[in-house]
Image (cartoon, rainbow, N blue to C red):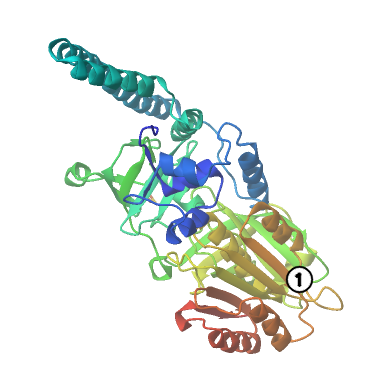
C-alpha cells in the first residue's frame, strides 16, 4: 500500500529537497516529476528523490549558509515569528492534526463495522463463503498491519514540512503567479522585496497606501500600526497594507508587481557606511538609506549621487532585496565625485541620492537560462541583476562572464572572490572571468563557443557599444531571440 496522498507546492518541494525552485520547474517541464494542479504528491516526491535523507538536512543547511554569506550584506531575519503568529500557526496545524485524527477514528469504526458484517456473512453462508470471508479478513488484517514501504521516509518528510510551515509560510501573488516565503517577523512587503519581487509600495511605513493588496485566501495579521485609512468597503473585500501585515498561514494575495515606469523619481539622503578600496582603480561606496525612506529601484538601474557641489551618475551594484543597503562602484578619475570618494569621504557623511533611472532590468517571468556578461565596470549593474536573479530563483541556470584586465591599468576582476563564492553556493551557476585585452571579438567567440544554441536563453550585457554590438550580432546568429537581448551601453 502507498502512504496517504499529500500535496505540496513547488516552492516547498524545492526547500524540502534542497534544490533551487528553477531545478524543480525544469524537472516538471521535462516530465521527470509529475504534478497535479501545480502540486506534487508526496508519493511522487519519495519516488523521484529516493536518496534524500529527510531527517538529515545538514547539506541543505550548509548550502543555505554559504548562500547567505555569498549575498554579503543581505540580511536574513532568522528570528522566530512573533508569539501570536506562532500561536496561530500552531493552532492551524493542530486543527489539521485533529481533522486527520478524526478521520482515522472514523475509518477505524468503518473497519470494525465491516469486520462484524463479514462475520455475519460467514455465519449465514456455506463453506465456500466462509473460506472466502476468512481469506478476505486475513488480507485486510495483513494490509492494515503492514507499514507502507516508505512509511518512515514519508513520516520524516511530513514532520519536516510541518516544521517548515510553522517557521515560514508561502505567499502566491495574483495575477503574476510569483511565489515567496515569509520568514521571521517580516512583513509581506519586506519578504517580497527580499525575494526579489518588486511589489508596489511607497513609504514602507503605513502612510501612503501605495502597498494596498487584497487577500484572496489565507490569513494575515497586522504587525505594525498604520496611519493610512482603509475604507470600510475596501476592508470588507480583503484590502490590507503589505507594509503593515505579515502572513499567518499560506496566503494568496492580489498585488501589483511594478516595472520601471511605476517607480517615481525619489531623492533621499543616505549616509556613508564604508568606502571599500577594491584596487588602485575602483572603490565600492556603501551607503545606508534612512530607515523611514529606503530607495525604490530595480536591479540594473542607476542613480545620481551628490556630495556638496559635486555629483556623478552610478549604477547600483547591490540588489533591491538588500533592505537599506546601496552599493555603487566608483572608478578613479579626475572628476570631483571620484576624487572625493578615494581621498576624503568618511563614514556617516551624507550623500544625496536621486533616481532611479534606466530600463536595464530583469524580465521577471523568464525561466530560461540567463547569460550575464560584463565588460570591466559594466559589472556593477550586472552584479545587481545576478543577485536579483538568485533571489528570484526562477532561471534554469545562470552564467556570468566578466571581461576585465588584471594587469596594467585595467580595472581588474575587482570582486572576483564574490563571484567564486556564488559558484560554490549554487549548483547552476557558472562564473568565467576573462581578459579584456584580447578584444571584443575574442571574448564573444569564447562565450558563443560555450553556447552553440541560444534559442532558449536571455542575455543581459553591460559594456561599451562596440562590444555589445559584436555580442548581439553573434548571439542572434546562435539563435537568440531579439526579445532575449538586453544590452546597456556603459
Ligand atoms: S508603502 Fe506606504 S503604506 Fe505601505
Residue 147 left/right relative to 382: left
Instruction: Assign the C terminus to one quadrant of the image.
Output: bottom right
- Place residue 308 in its image quadrant: bottom right
Rendered residue at 62%/39% (across/down): 61
Instruction: Assign the N terminus to one quadrant of the image.
Output: top left
Residue 419 lies, in percent from the top left, at 70, 61
Residue 10 lies, in percent from the top left, at 43, 49
Residue 324 lies, in percent from the top left, at 56, 52
Q: Specify whether residue 106 is in view.
A: no
Q: In this rendering, is residue 317 above or below 154?
A: below
Rendered residue at 67%/72% (across/down): 401
Q: Specify whether residue 290 is in view.
A: yes
Q: In this rendering, is residue 255 above or below 114?
A: below
Q: Residue furthest left?
A: 124
- Place residue 448 in its image quadrant: bottom right
Q: In this rendering, is residue 479 above or below 183?
A: below
Rendered residue at 62%/68% (across/down): 399
Mark 1 neighbour density, 10 Å: few (under 14) some (14–19) many (20 or more):
some
Of residues 339 and 97, the one drawn nearer to the viewer in this rendering: 97
Residue on which the image places disc 1: 339
Residue 472 lies, in percent from the top left, at 57, 85
Residue 67 left/right relative to 254: right
Q: Residue furthest top?
A: 123
User: For the residue labelled by badge 1, is the local secondary structure a helix, a strand or a loop?
Assistant: helix
Q: Residue furthest right?
A: 408
Q: Residue furthest front?
A: 127
Number of numbered markers: 1
Amino acid at each position: 500500500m502507498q502512504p496517504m496522498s499529500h500535496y505540496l507546492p513547488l516552492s516547498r518541494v524545492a526547500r524540502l529537497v534542497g534544490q533551487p525552485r528553477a531545478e524543480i520547474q525544469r524537472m516538471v517541464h521535462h516530465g521527470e516529476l509529475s504534478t497535479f494542479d501545480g502540486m506534487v504528491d508526496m508519493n511522487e516526491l519519495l519516488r523521484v528523490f529516493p536518496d534524500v535523507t529527510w531527517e538529515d538536512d545538514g547539506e541543505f543547511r550548509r548550502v543555505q549558509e554559504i548562500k547567505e554569506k555569498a549575498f554579503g550584506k543581505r540580511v536574513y531575519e532568522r528570528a522566530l515569528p512573533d508569539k501570536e503568529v506562532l500561536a496561530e500557526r500552531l493552532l492551524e496545524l493542530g486543527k489539521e492534526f485533529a481533522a486527520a485524527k478524526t478521520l482515522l477514528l472514523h475509518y477505524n469504526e468503518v473497519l470494525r463495522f465491516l469486520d462484524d458484517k463479514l462475520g455475519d456473512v460467514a455465519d449465514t453462508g456455506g463453506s465456500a463463503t466462509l473460506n472466502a470471508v476468512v481469506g478476505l479478513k486475513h488480507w485486510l488484517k495483513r494490509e492494515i498491519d503492514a507499514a507502507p514501504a516508505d512509511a518512515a521516509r514519508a513520516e520524516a518528510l511530513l514532520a519536516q514540512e510541518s516544521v517548515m510551515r510553522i517557521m515560514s509560510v508561502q505567499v502566491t501573488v495574483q495575477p503574476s503567479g510569483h511565489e515567496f516565503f515569509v520568514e521571521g517577523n517580516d512583513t509581506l512587503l519586506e519578504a517580497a522585496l527580499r525575494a526579489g519581487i518588486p511589489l508596489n509600495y511607497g513609504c514602507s511605513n503605513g502612510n501612503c497606501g501605495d502597498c494596498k493588496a487584497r487577500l484572496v485566501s489565507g490569513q494575515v495579521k497586522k504587525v505594525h500600526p498604520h496611519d493610512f485609512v482603509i475604507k470600510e468597503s475596501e476592508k470588507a473585500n480583503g484590502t490590507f497594507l503589505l507594509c503593515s501585515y505579515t502572513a499567518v498561514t499560506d496566503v494568496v494575495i492580489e498585488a501589483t508587481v511594478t516595472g520601471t515606469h511605476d517607480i517615481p523619481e525619489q531623492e533621499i539622503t543616505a549616509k556613508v557606511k564604508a568606502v571599500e578600496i577594491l584596487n588602485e582603480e575602483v572603490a565600492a561606496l556603501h551607503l545606508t538609506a534612512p530607515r523611514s525612506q529606503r530607495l525604490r529601484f530595480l536591479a540594473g538601474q542607476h542613480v545620481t549621487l551628490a556630495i556638496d557641489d559635486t555629483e556623478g551618475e552610478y549604477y547600483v551594484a547591490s540588489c533591491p532585496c538588500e533592505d537599506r543597503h546601496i552599493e555603487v562602484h566608483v572608478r578613479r578619475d579626475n572628476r570631483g565625485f571620484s576624487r572625493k570618494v578615494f581621498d576624503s569621504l568618511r563614514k556617516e557623511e551624507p550623500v544625496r541620492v536621486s533616481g532611479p533611472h534606466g530600463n536595464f532590468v530583469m524580465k521577471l517571468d523568464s525561466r530560461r537560462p540567463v547569460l550575464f556578461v560584463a565588460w570591466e565596470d559594466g559589472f556593477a549593474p550586472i552584479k545587481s541583476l545576478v543577485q536579483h536573479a538568485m533571489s528570484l530563483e526562477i532561471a534554469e541556470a545562470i552564467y556570468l562572464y566578466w571581461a576585465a584586465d588584471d594587469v596594467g591599468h585595467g580595472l581588474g576582476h575587482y570582486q572576483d572572490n564574490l563571484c567564486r563564492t556564488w559558484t560554490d553556493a549554487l549548483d547552476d551557476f557558472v562564473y568565467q572571468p576573462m581578459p579584456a585585452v584580447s578584444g571584443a571579438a575574442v571574448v564573444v567567440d569564447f562565450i558563443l563557443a560555450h553556447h552553440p544554441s541560444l534559442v532558449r536563453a536571455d542575455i543581459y550585457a553591460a559594456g561599451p557599444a562596440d562590444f555589445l554590438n559584436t555580442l548581439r550580432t553573434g548571439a542572434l546568429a546562435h539563435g537568440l531571440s531579439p526579445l532575449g537581448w538586453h544590452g546597456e551601453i556603459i
